């Protein structure tokens, strides 16, 4: 992140989103980034990936830390790219290397939180140096989708929305993971499990931004990737008849028969 006489390269300004989300920019830097954010869908999308993390980060900021000791992060729910996590750590530790110890440990903890997946070890010291362990790029829903073998898929001929549903037997019911493609927003949607007895259960809900998910050749880079969400149904696997992806106002986008 470079600010000299108000000038900033395009690459630098895109990398500022992590520091802005953590609230460690000074007033001038924050104002400059907000002006850029108003017209940049890429940064807006990345900023959404940090939404809801403030309480966890605030709690971590109050944890005691000794000079030179690593901050260890476990697997938590999020789905940013490895590039975003790397950018956050490199950019913040480079530009805030001489800030007080508490800020640097917060940055390391935040990187561990947003990565998700296998255990990640991060060491951040007062001189700005850092070391990282293995980082996973996939969030928990996508990871679950990859290892589940029981999957069914369908594409609606009217909406052209495609859905693949993975199912995993649990003691409490059925763990359900959805991969959704070719859907544009803005929409608020839900995944409904329909039992063979006609009962309906909401598995999970989510919002679709205007640029959508799983749209090949989209001018909006993040729209090229599918949406992955997961949740649970109280139905046992053999009690499920189908899944329906609907908008919250009742419009069906796709139906997947089991």
Image (cartoon, rainbow, N blue to C red):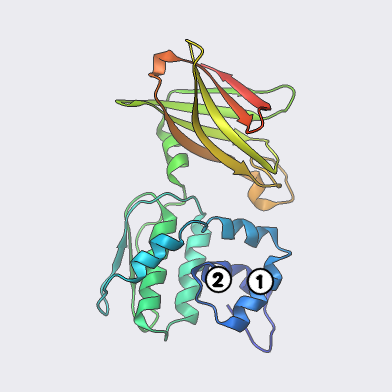
* Mark 1 burial class by Cα count in 10 Å: few <14, some 14-19, many 20+: few
Q: Is residue 193 shown left or right of residue 117?
A: right
- Residue 30 lies in quadrant: bottom right
Cβ atoms at labels 1 and 2 below 8 Å apart: yes
SS under mark 2: helix
| Outermost residue toward the bottom in this view | 5
Residue 9 percent coordinates (x, y): 68, 76
**Residue identifier under label 2:** 20
Which residue is at a point 48% across and 11% down the rendered structure image? 196
Label located before the other in sequence (1 or 2)? 2
Q: Position of residue 243 (x, y in %)?
A: 54, 22
The residue to which callout 1 is attached is 34
Say which residue appears at 27% left-offset and 80% top-offset. Answer: 67
Q: Position of residue 253 (x, y in %)?
A: 66, 28
In the image, 208 versus 220, the foreground residue is 208
Q: Residue 240 appears at what percent x and percent y? A: 46, 16
User: Observer-nearest residue: 4 or 134?
Assistant: 4
Q: CA distance from mark 1 to mark 2?
A: 9 Å
Q: Specify the quadrant of the image occupied by residue 212.
A: top right
| Residue 202 versus residue 137 in the image, above or below | above
| Whether residue 245 is situated above or below residue 34 in the rendered picture | above
Residue 142 — which label?
none
**Residue farthest toward the top in the current orientation of the protein:** 197
Residue 32 vs residue 258: left or right? right
Q: Secondary structure at mark 1?
A: helix
Residue 111 makes an appearance in the image = no
In this orientation, which residue lies closer to the viewer: 167 or 216?
A: 167
Give the quarter of the figure containing the N terminus.
Answer: bottom right
**Image point (65%, 77%), residue name:** 31
Q: Nearer the viewer, residue 195 or 154?
A: 195
Residue 141 showing in the rendered view = yes
């Amino acid at each position: 992140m470079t600010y000299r006489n108000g000038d900033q390269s395009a690459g630098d300004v895109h990398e500022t989103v992590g520091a802005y989300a953590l609230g460690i920019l000074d007033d001038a830097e924050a104002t400059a980034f907000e002006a850029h954010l108003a017209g940049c869908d890429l940064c807006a999308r990345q900023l959404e990936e940090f939404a809801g993390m403030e309480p966890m980060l605030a709690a971590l900021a109050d944890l005691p830390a000794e000079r030179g000791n690593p901050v260890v992060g476990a697997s938590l729910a999020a789905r940013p790219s490895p590039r975003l996590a790397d950018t956050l750590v490199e950019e913040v530790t480079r530009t805030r290397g001489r800030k007080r110890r508490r800020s640097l440990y917060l940055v390391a903890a935040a990187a561990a939180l947003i990565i998700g997946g296998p255990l990640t070890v991060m060491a951040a010291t007062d001189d700005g140096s850092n070391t990282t362990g293995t980082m996973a790029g996939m969030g928990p829903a996508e990871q679950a989708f990859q290892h589940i073998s029981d999957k069914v898929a369908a594409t609606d001929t009217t909406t052209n929305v495609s859905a693949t549903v993975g199912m995993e037997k649990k003691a409490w019911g059925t763990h359900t993971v959805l991969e959704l493609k070719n859907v544009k927003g803005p929409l608020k949607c839900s995944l409904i499990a329909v039992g063979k007895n006609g009962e309906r259960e909401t598995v999970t809900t989510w919002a679709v931004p205007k640029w959508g998910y799983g749209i090949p050749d989209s001018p909006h880079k993040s729209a090229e990737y599918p949406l992955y969400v997961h949740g649970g149904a109280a139905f046992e696997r053999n009690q499920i008849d189908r899944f329906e992806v609907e908008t919250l106002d009742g419009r069906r986008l796709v139906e997947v028969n089991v």
